[in-house]
Image (cartoon, helix red, strand yellow):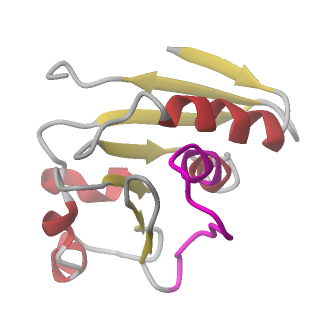
Amino acid sequence: MKIITGSPAETRKFAQGFARKLRKGDILCLKGELGSGKTTFIQGLARGLGIRGNVVSPTFVLLAEYKGKIPLYHFDLYRLNSTEEIRALGYEEFFYGSGITVIEWAEKLKELMPEKYIEVRFKIINKNKREIVITPDNQR
């Protein structure tokens, strides 16, 4: 699936609707350059999962956990430099569990990538426009 959004509000609205298609245990691996809309997308996902309150990038805490109809586990791997640092987070306990796991900068997982995941790629077109390409795993 490929979509072009024209503003951060459109990105959030699209993600809010997309959240309704997700199931417990789903893992979303987000890839894209800095400022491409990953956190904005997650804000929409959270709203779609019934999560209230502010959703911000957990860059400095690496993991944020939000309670809603389905829990949302939001990893931000931007500051990590090695797979050893990622292992130290205990990330696997969140995979395929009772919530939705979203990983920003998922390309840093390398060989730690889960077997089944939904890839979400972000591309900056201009100041406000973003291309979002969602590739579902083949195991759904």
Q: Residue at x 59, y 28 (%)?
A: 132
Q: Which residues are magenta?
A: 43-60
The answer to if 45 sits in the magenta stretch is yes
Horizontally, is 39 left or right of 110 in the view?
right
The residue positioned farthest toward the top in the image shown: 1
Can you say which quadrant of the picture contains the C terminus?
Answer: top left
Quarter of the figure with residue 17: top right
Residue drawn at x 33%, y 33% is 118
Residue 71, horizontal then vertical, whole percent: 37, 60
Image coordinates of residue 19 in percent, x first then y, are 49, 37
Tell me the chief SS of the magenta region.
loop
Q: Is residue 29 above or below residue 122?
A: below
Q: Depth check: give the residue in front, 123 or 93.
A: 93
Between 80 and 98, which is closer to the camera in this rendering? 98
Residue positioned 62% across, 67% down in the render: 55
**Rendering coords of residue 64 (x, y %):** 45, 74
Q: How many marks?
A: 0
State left or right for residue 113 relative to residue 9.
left
Whether the magenta-drawn stretch holds residue 33 is answered as no
